[in-house]
Amino acid sequence: MKQFQSSRRSFLALAALTPFAAMATTACGTSGPGGSGGGGGASMWFLTGEPNQTTMQNAVDAFVAANPDNKINVTYFQNDAYKTKIKTAIGAGQAPTIVYGWGGGGLKTYAEANQVEDLTPWFDANPDVKEKFFPSSFGAATVNGKIYALPNQYVAPIVLFYNKELFEKAGVQPPKTWDDIMSLVKTFNDMGVAPFSLGGQSRWTSMMWLEYLLDRIGGAEVFNAIFEGKPDAWMHPAVIETGTRIQELVSADGFIKGFSSITADSKADQALLFTGKAAMMLHGSWTYGAMKKEGQNFVQDGKLGFVHFPTVAGGKGDPKSGVGNPAQYMSISAKASDKEKETAKKFFKEGILTDKVIDAYINSGSVPIVNGIEDKLASSPDKDFLNFVYDLAKNAPTFQQSWDQALSPTAAEALLNNIDQLFLKSITPKQFAENMNATLGK
């Protein structure tokens, strides 16, 4: 997820592309990773991928047009390349003025190293800004009682999508239990259709399965213990059972053939769903907008279905609980000049989630993290999906932030590497747990 994201993510990266897919500036030129640009403006790094890239660029352009003395230069990166690039830049003291992120463990690392600004005094001086956003969006922006990031964009829970046409053809209903999933795997394989699309090369897409399964099997307290670094937290029986069920799903050909070579940045995993090559896909709610834009009228024709993640027999988790991203976040580099910080804060107050931006997100199929938008959602042609997401986020007794965001960068990278091995069955569920247990406290 989390109200929100993610967009958390942009999607499937083509290997031939350079680390960044596009760059746009509102002032002439840039001067390197943390550069201010030829016009002396602030800098911002953001993710490629529509519709979010255009929405953010339009927001920046509108802000700069209204504030010509506060220029902002934006550079766009693909998701996976960005996560590596930003860590390097921050560590080298060359971060952009505005640091895009997902809060949680990564933000905690930056905050404790004094690499990003404490925004608590600014929020105290601008209570109207804080009151605009969902209260739940501030949890992942807070470190040791202080706020280090501005929540923005939209809530992005992880959703189980399905192709209604294929389900009607098979004469089956969307899954409500894990047993239903395993039954549907056989049904669709017998039809010559992949049961689930998966961009496994990106690894974080595979992680979504573990997040929901662990929650349904063991309840929210299992990952909470991991997050808190409690001894042997990763060795909980629910973690082992989660890995076991995942490998059973892999062995049953639950995922598209060659899933480990499919990336999410190129949206190939989404294309498999809307072209009918896969029947289901577990993914972030932000993919709805992308599929609406690029899915050959798949969404507009009512062929896309969506449901909550199924229950697991004997599981302790609440079936209403969600996982995903409560929001996306923007911090301000502690290394930025006073003028750049001033521009960033002005943009945070006047340029983020304006009425036009809110409408743009809703029109693209997302739920912005701002209060008082019920009427806007109800009048949208996408109201069924938007209200599904809104209700999921609002009614979830727990909303687990995506693991690779909640954990420290060191633990998160180890997690993604071990998830890859778990799905490829090169390690056992017990080995996965042991390997991750060794990261506690790191």
Image (spheres, rainbow, N blue to C red):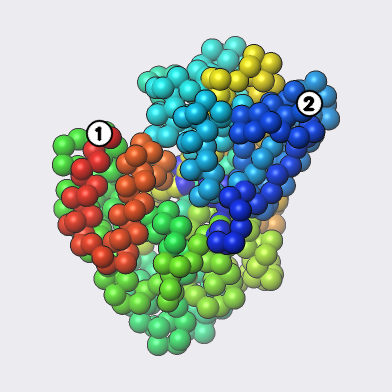
Task: Work out whether residue 375 can be spotted.
Answer: no
Q: Residue at x 69, y 70 (%)?
A: 297
Q: Residue at x 49, y 43 (%)?
A: 83
Query: Residue 85 or 325: which is nearer the viewer?
Result: 85
Q: Position of residue 38 (x, y in %)?
A: 77, 28
Which residue corresponds to mark 1? 441
Residue 12 lies, with reference to residue 27, above or below; the image says below
Residue 123 lies, with reference to residue 250, above or below; the image says above
Question: Residue 263's mark?
Answer: none
Give the residue type that dot 2 points to: Gly
Other-residue count near label 2 (Cα within 10 Å), few / some / many at <14 / 14–19 / ≥20? some
Which residue corresponds to mark 2? 39
Residue 282 lies, with reference to residue 351, above or below; the image says below
Q: Position of residue 322 (x, y in %)?
A: 41, 49
Quarter of the image for the C terminus: give it: top left
**Circle nearer the N terminus (2, 1):** 2
* Element type where label 2 sits in the image: loop
* Element type where label 1 sits in the image: loop
Q: Residue at x 36, y 46 (%)?
A: 413
Given this view, does label 2 or label 1 mark the residue nearer the observer?
A: 2
